[in-house]
Amino acid sequence: MRKSDPRMAAIGDVDEANSAIGVALVQLPAGPVRDTLLLVQNDLFDLGADLATPAGEGEDFAPSAMVLRILPAQVARLEAAIDAANADLAPLRSFILPGGSAAAAALHLARAIARRAERAMVAVDAPINPAALSYINRLSDFLFVAARALNQNGSGDVLWVPGRAR
């Protein structure tokens, strides 16, 4: 596979998201967000392996002893983490700007990279594991709510003020 292949771009973007999560992790204290992100980093290596192993003709994306695939259970675990992180958040009153604490800003960066990885994955001109696509989609949502949780459950969010710089 050529380095210019869209699949390689997707793998690279997943790796970059993982690296950005690592930058956030060094700033995080022990707790549920940190625990989830440590699992996510492992999952992202699984996702990279999944992307690097295209399904053959007529093959589905069922896990096997030979091929590592993202599983629906990994997506469900991430969705449960989103619900848990979102439970105590203040309601959004405005769009928020990436920032607040250093760790939250790092998670916002990781979120933006995860969204790019998702766009790269859907640009691959071949079947992609549907669970892998769900996982990267839900990851960006988790990173958003986790950043808000780190910003004093949303009270430390930096709110967008439309036209402020005019």
Image (cartoon, grey):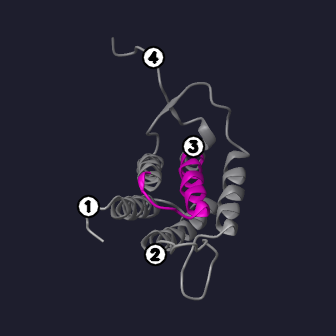
List the residue tagged with mark 3: 148
List the residue tagged with mark 1: 4
- Distance from the alpha carbon under mark 3 to that under mark 1: 36 Å
Q: Position of residue 129 (x, y in %)?
A: 56, 64
The mark nearer the N terminus, 4 or 2, is: 2
**Going 67% across and 35% down the picture, which residue do you hit?**
90
Q: Position of residue 75 (x, y in %)?
A: 65, 62
The amino acid pointed to by label 1 is Ser
The amino acid pointed to by label 4 is Pro
Q: Is residue 124 visible?
A: yes
The mark nearer the N terminus, 3 or 1, is: 1
The amino acid pointed to by label 2 is Thr
Q: Is residue 140 above or below residue 36?
A: above
Hey, which residue is sitting farthest left in the picture? 3
Circles 3 and 4 in contact, beta carbons < 8 Å: no
List the residue tagged with mark 2: 53
Circles 2 and 1 in contact, beta carbons < 8 Å: no
Judge left or right: residue 115 versus residue 30. Answer: left
- Distance from the alpha carbon under mark 3 to that under mark 2: 35 Å
Quadrant for the C terminus in the image: top left
- Distance from the alpha carbon under mark 1 to that under mark 4: 39 Å
Hey, which residue is sitting farthest bottom in the picture? 65
Q: Secondary structure at mark 3?
A: helix
Q: Nearer the viewer, mark 1 or mark 4?
A: 1
Q: Is residue 65 above or below residue 45?
A: below
Q: Which residues are magenta?
A: 123-145
Q: Secondary structure at mark 1?
A: loop
- Distance from the alpha carbon under mark 2 to that under mark 1: 17 Å
- Distance from the alpha carbon under mark 3 to that under mark 4: 20 Å
List the residue tagged with mark 4: 162
**Going 53% across and 35% down the picture, which residue do you hit?**
157
Q: Position of residue 154 (x, y in %)?
A: 60, 38
